[in-house]
Image (cartoon, grey):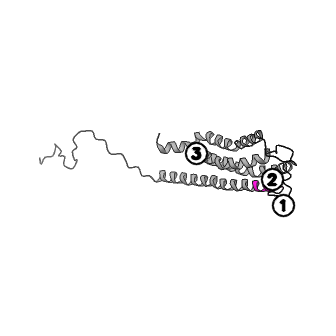
Amino acid sequence: MSTRRRVETKSSLALAALLSVPLYFAALMASSLALDTPKHPPLRGAPSTGSTELKVWAAALIAPAIMLAIGFAALPLRRFGVFVAAAGGIVLCFVLPPLSKRWIPGHIRRFPLGMDFIPDKSPSNLSSRGEWEAAAHATIASICKYTLVIAIGAIVIGLFLEWRRRRGSEGIFVPPSPAAVTGEGEVSPVLELDDRDPGR
């Protein structure tokens, strides 16, 4: 198998791996909004437990796992699998921001004093109620926006390359095959004399 053919065969998985990296960080913020819980009652305040943090990190793997599964499933489509992988990335980019927005109220209820566990009116306050959640959602939306640009760019490039490939195959001139050589002597019909010519 040629190098070009190998690249075309694995292109969907390569694109899926590329898109899964930013999607993982977006999913990590989203899973924090969904699952992060303080260790003690929120009024006393304490960081999350180790088991909770493990759940957050594990849940963040769901989005990139879906992305890689799509890229792997699209491998039989060869170069057309890129479009399937890009479409999967686009769908995830549209799903994560609104999904994380739904988890914001629950996170605020679990952290009513903000992530610093200090009342908003205190001069020592560093993170007001709902401030971290808003910043997390904005980060998720920003990451998904740039990931969306990469996915759409992959589709545009794929369509352009396919157009070039089809246009090139239609414009290739194939010369006719040369006449077969039999090994027999060739005699020009103009110079060949007829045996019945009386002037011979």
Q: Earlier in the sequence, mark 2 or mark 1?
A: 2
Mark 3 or mark 2, whichever is nearer to me? 2
Which circle marks residue 14 in the picture? 3
What is the crowding at mark 1: few (fewer than 14 residues within 10 Å), some, or many (at least 20)? few
Task: Kindly identify which residue carries mark 2.
Answer: 116
Q: Amino acid at mark 3?
A: Ala
Q: Nearer the viewer, residue 177 or 125?
A: 125
Task: State the predominant SS element of the stretch in magenta.
Answer: loop
Of label 3 and label 1, which has the lower sequence position? 3
User: Measuring 64% from the left and 42% from the top, which residue is drawn there?
Assistant: 68
Stretch of the chain drawn in magenta: 116-136
Question: Foreground mark, 3 or 1?
Answer: 1
In this rendering, the answer to whether 153 lies above or below 7 is below
Kindly check if marks 2 and 1 are in contact, taking CB atoms under 8 A apart as contact.
no
Residue lying farthest to the front in this orientation: 124
Q: Mark 3 falls on what kind of element? A: helix
Q: Callout 2 environment at 10 Å: few (<14), some (14 to 19), or many (20+)? A: some
Amino acid, disc 2: Asp
Q: Which mark is residue 112?
A: none
Position of residue 156 measured from the top left corner of the image (x, y, whole percent): 60, 55
- Helix, strand or loop at mark 2: loop
C-alpha span from label 3 to label 1: 50 Å
Position of 151 with respect to 40 (left or right) is left
Give the number of the disc on residue 123. Answer: 1
Q: Residues within 10 Å of mark 3 (few under 14, many from 20)?
A: some
- Horizontal and vertical percent position of residue 80: 58, 46
